[in-house]
Amino acid sequence: MASRYLEKGVSNTAVRHHNYDHNGLSWREELPPITNESRMKFKLILTLLGLISFTWFTRLDFGQWLVAAPSLRQIIRSDLEQPQSSSTTTSATIFAPLQTRPVLECFQVASPVLGPDGPFPPPATGGGYDTTNNRAADEPCSVILMEHVFAFSYGMPFVGNYTPPSCQFNRVVMNFTVVSEGRQFDRLALMYFGDTEVWRTSTAEPTQPPGIRWTFLKDMTEYMYFWKSPQKLIFDLGNLMDDKYTGSFNATLTATFFVAEVETDAAPPADIIIPISTRKGATDGASQFTLPAEMATNTIGFPRNVNRAVFSISANGQASEEFWWGNVLESDVLTFNKTAGQLLGLSPFREVQLLIDGKLAGVQWPFPVIFTGGVVPSLHRPIVGLQAFDLREHQIDITPWLPLLCDGAEHTFAIKVAGLNDSGADTNVTLTETVNDSWYVTGKIFLWLGEGDLVTTGTGPEVNIVGPTISLSRQVTQNGTGSNETLVFDTIIERTVTIKSTINSGGQTGESIWTQNLSYSNHALLSNFGSSQINNLTIIGEDLATNPGTSYKTIYSYPLYCNQTYSRSAQGNISINAHLIEGLELQIEGQSIFPTGLEAFEESIAASKNSYIASQLKTHRDGTAFFFQTGDGRNSSGYGTTNQIFSFGGSRKGATLDLEDDFNELYFRNVTAVNGTIVFDSERKTGVEVYNFVQPPRLDGYADASLSLFALVSDKETQPKGFMGDDAHERPSAQVQIS
C-alpha cells in the first residue's frame, strides 16, 4: 500500500521549501532574483545548466537509456525526521550514488498547514496519532479514510464510509499520499461527502521504476458540518490503463483530528452546507456537472433564519478546454487551416457565472491551472504547477440575496461558463451561452444560522452589473505566396458586479453589499504558420463583502506567460520547446470560509505581538523545457529546468493593491529542479533560515532514464494549444477522457 507520512502537518511539500524576494513579479525571460546568501551557489548552477542540457541531449540514445542523476528525497526525509527548532539551519551538499536513486518525491510548493503541534509538529514516525482507547479524549487522533489503487478506474470511484472518531476535535487536516510507477497521463480527482464536492486535486505523471510519490496536506476544518457525523466518502480518480499506459495510482487518504484554539479572522465552520451538483452520491457516483453537455442547475429552499450565505465554485477546463487561455478568437479559428489546422476558438477568455433565479449573482475568472502533463511534461517534475495538487475554489457572498432566499420558497441556482464570440453578422462581441467540451463544475452553499426562529427579512437585492467591456484587436500577416504566417491579437476585458440589499436578521439590521472589480488582458502571437505561440495573460480581481457583523475581502492576480514551439521532422519525430512563467498573488482579509494560512503561525504571531489583518501569498514559477518523441511513437523523453519562489506572510494594514506596502514574512521558499532533480533549495520560517540545500549539477551530462520518460503525445500536441484536430477528446492531457 502507499506509504503514509505523518498526518499532523509537516510542510505541504514534504520536500524542502523555498525562498522569495519582495521586489514584485518580473515577467521577463530570466530567472527571478534569489537571496544574497545563496546567490553565488545559484549562479554556479545556472552557469552549468546550459552545458548539462546540451550534453544530455547530444548523448540521447533511445536504444541505451542514460544513467540516473539522483533524487534528493532521502536526505530531505531524514532531515524532516529530526526535531528541528526555528533557530536551526540545515545545510547539505551531496552527490548520491547513481545506482541507488530512490522514489522521486514530487511536490507542490505551498505554505505549512496547522497540525496538532504547529506547522512542523513531531513526531516524525509516520504512524499517525492514536485512535485506540489508550489515549485521552483531548489528544489528537487519526483515521484512515481510504486505501485504494486507482488502476482502470474511469467511472468507478472509490466509495467508503466515514465514522467520526471518538477524540475531541475542532480542526481537521487531511494527508493524501500517492505512489505510482510506469507511464501515465495526469488525472483529475474529486472528493465528495455524499453529493458535495469537498476537494479537487490532480496527479503527477509517474516515472519508470522506482516511480514517484507525493504527499499533500490539506486543512479541511471548514467542513466540520460533515466531519461531525457519518458520511459516504466518494473519491473519483478516473484512470485508464493498457499495455502502453501502465501506471496506476496507489493512494492513501488519512485525516487527523485535534483541538487548537486559533484566533484568526476566518469564519467559524458553517452550520449547513448545501451541494449544487448532479447529486449522484446515493448511487455511488461522482456528482460533478460536465459542461456544456449538462445544465448545472439545482432548485433548493433555504432555512428562513439564515444570517450569512456564501457560494463556493469549483471549476476547471478539461479536454478541449484544458488550455482555454491559449484559444484564439472565433473569427480566427481557420487562420492556419492549411498548415497547423483548425484552432479552438471562443477566445482565450472564460467567465464562470453564478445565477440565482436567472440573475447574475457573481462571477469567477478562473485561475489558469496547468496540470503535470501540460505544455511540456518535463516542466513539472518534480515541482508541479501552481494549484495542481490543490485546485482553489472561489467564494461569492450571496448574503445580499437573503431577503429573497429566506422567503420560504424554492429558488434556482445555476453555474455557467462563458467565452467570447466575435464572429457574428454585426461587429458586436458577445458572451457565449456555451463553450467547448468540457468544464467540470460543482458548487456549494455555506449557511450560518441566526439564533432562534427569527425569520430573515429585508429589501432587495438590487443588482447592478457593469460590462463586461470588451476590447479586441487582431492582425494577420502573410508571406510572399499569400499563406498566413503570423496572427497577433489582444483581448482586454473589464467587469464590475455590485449586489445590494438591506437585511433584518437575528436582531441585526444593516446593509449587505457584494462587489467585484475584475480586469483581464491577453496578448497573443501565433507565428511560423501556426507552429509557435506566445500568450501573455494577466487576470486581476478584487472582491468585497460587507454584511451586518461580517466582512470579507480578497485581492488576487494571476499572471501567466507561455512561449511554445512545436515541430515535426520528415521522419515524424516530434519536438516541443517551451518557456512557462506562472504567478499567483493572493490577499485575504476578514471572514473567509476557507483557511487563510495564518492559522499555522498563530503561536509565532502571538509571540511577536503582531496582529495581522490580512494574509498575503505571492509566488512565481519559471521553467524552460524540451520534449522529444520518435516518429514511431515508441519512445519519448524530455528535460527541463524549473525555479519557484514562494512567500507567505501577514499584513497589519489589510488587503491592498500594493502587496509590498506592509508585508511581514512568515514562510519563504526558493527551489530549483534540473532534469527531475532538486539542485537548489532554501527555506525560511518566520524569518529564520531552516534549510539550505545545494547539489552541484553533474558535469558528465548524464540524466536518469526513468526521469526522462513521459507519456507520449498525440499528433495534436504538435499543434498550438488551441488546435482542434479531428477529435479534441483524444488530447492526452485530458484527465478522464476515453480515447
Image (spheres, helix red, strand yellow):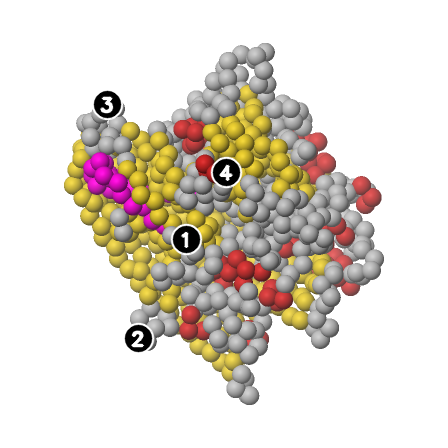
Q: Residues within 10 Å of mark 4 (few under 14, many from 20)?
A: some
Q: Position of residue 48 (x, y in %)?
A: 72, 56
Q: Which one is earlier in the sequence, the residue at label 3 or at label 1?
A: 1
Q: CA distance from mark 3 to mark 1?
A: 39 Å
Residue 408 in magenta stretch: yes
Label 2 amino acid? Asp
Quick one: SS at disc 3?
Answer: loop
Mark carried by residue 423: none
Residue 564 in picture, x, y percent from top left: 58, 65
- Disc 1 and disc 4: Cα gap in Å? 19 Å
How packed mark 2 is, by other alpha carbons closer than 10 Å (few <14, some 14-19, many 20 or more), is few
Work out how far the residue at label 2 is from the one at label 4, CA to CA, in angstroms.
48 Å
- Range covered by the magenta-colored residues: 393-415
Label 1 close to label 4 by CB (< 8 Å): no
Q: Quadrant of the N terminus?
A: top right
Three-letter residue code for mark 4 = Asp
Name the residue tied to disc 1.
294
Q: Nearer the viewer, residue 141 or 50?
A: 141
> Which residue is under mark 4?
284
Earlier-in-chain disc, 2 versus 3: 2
For the residues marked 1 and 2, what is the alpha-carbon distance in whole angstroms?
30 Å
What is the number of the mark on residue 452? 3
Residue 563: x and y in percent read: 56, 64
Q: Are marks 1 and 2 in contact (CB under 8 Å)?
A: no
